[in-house]
Image: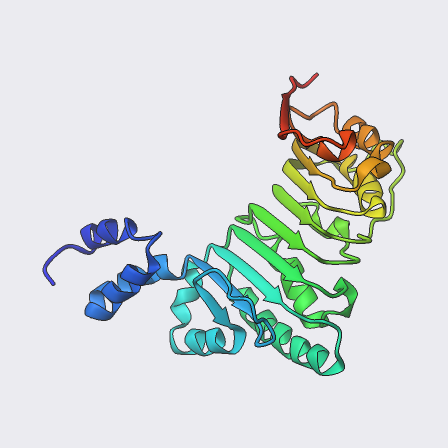
Amino acid sequence: MSLPDELVDHILSFLQSDLVTLKKCAEAHPILSRISERYIYAKVALYDFLTTVPVTPPGFRTTKFAQIIAKTPNITNHIRDLEIYINNKGDPWQSKATASHLKSIASMLPAFSRMKTIALSVRIPWHTLPEMFRQAFQHLIRVQCMKNVSIFHMSFFPLSMLNNCKTLTLHNCKDVQYEKEPIDSEDRPYWALEHLSIQHSNYETLEKITSWVQMHSLRSLAVILDDKFKFRDLLPQLLSACSSTLINLDLDLRWYSGCTFPSIEFHFLSG
């Protein structure tokens, strides 16, 4: 192949959304294979063998992806977006399999140092996950290049671990953990949080998020609550906690009125 690598790379960049064609190109020539890796592995989803619902491509069984990394370790430099799915329904044999897969993922995570986005969907309590995985995950979300963190279906997740996040999504997270710090402390830290999205959380979770968000300079907030009038007293508290820095609010009001309305977006000027 006589084309310069830069030109080939530019051509392949147009196929980022067409992974089937991109993989076929990679099989056609060694140079195409090498250059296309950065696009094929830019977004990776890892799931355990218990997961029956197909994961959006490119999805890999954890064991399979470990084999790929062992064979071609340089692909870890291309990963920018990682999704981790664990489908555990609480059976003892599932718990053992889940621990095995999470330990396998934990051994990979230190190599994913250039990631910008990570999503974790695990339907079991945070404190029951292997310590090896919890430490590796905590280290990864604190790397400088990390921009977006999403937590799905997790219970008892420690909010303080997310202090350095720039963009955060909490979806259906129950009973998150947070010990409220003194509000009148003069030396309390304020972490900049560009955007926080809260979706389908329970009352206790929203209550702790309200306390936690006071420690941040929150710029943008999106809230989707679907539990009728249960959150009427907490929502004003949440808005008040970030009112001094908030410039954008996306609030779904369908739960409040009992009627179906489109999401309403409010724009504020700080100060």
The answer to whether residue 165 is seen in the rendering is no
Residue 18 horizontal/vertical position (percent): 32, 55
Residue 72 horizontal/vertical position (percent): 38, 73
The answer to whether residue 146 is seen in the rendering is yes
Residue 233: quarter of image? top right
Q: Residue at x 63, y 75 (%)?
A: 103
Residue 236: quarter of image? top right
Seen in the picture, residue 99 relative to 184 is either above or below; the reply is below
Q: Is residue 42 left or right of residue 214?
A: left
Seen in the picture, residue 147 relative to 158 is either above or below; the reply is above
Q: Is residue 103 left or right of residue 18?
A: right
Question: Extreme front residue here?
Answer: 259
Q: Residue at x 64, y 26 (%)?
A: 264
Q: Residue at x 29, y 53 (%)?
A: 15
Q: Is residue 145 left or right of residue 69?
A: right
Q: Nearer the viewer, residue 165 or 251?
A: 251
Seen in the picture, residue 157 relative to 63 is either above or below; the reply is above
Q: Which image quadrant: the N terminus? A: bottom left
Q: Nearer the viewer, residue 246 or 46?
A: 46
Residue 62 horizontal/vertical position (percent): 53, 74
Residue 131 horizontal/vertical position (percent): 72, 70
Q: Nearer the viewer, residue 21 or 218?
A: 21
Q: Residue at x 84, y 32 (%)?
A: 232
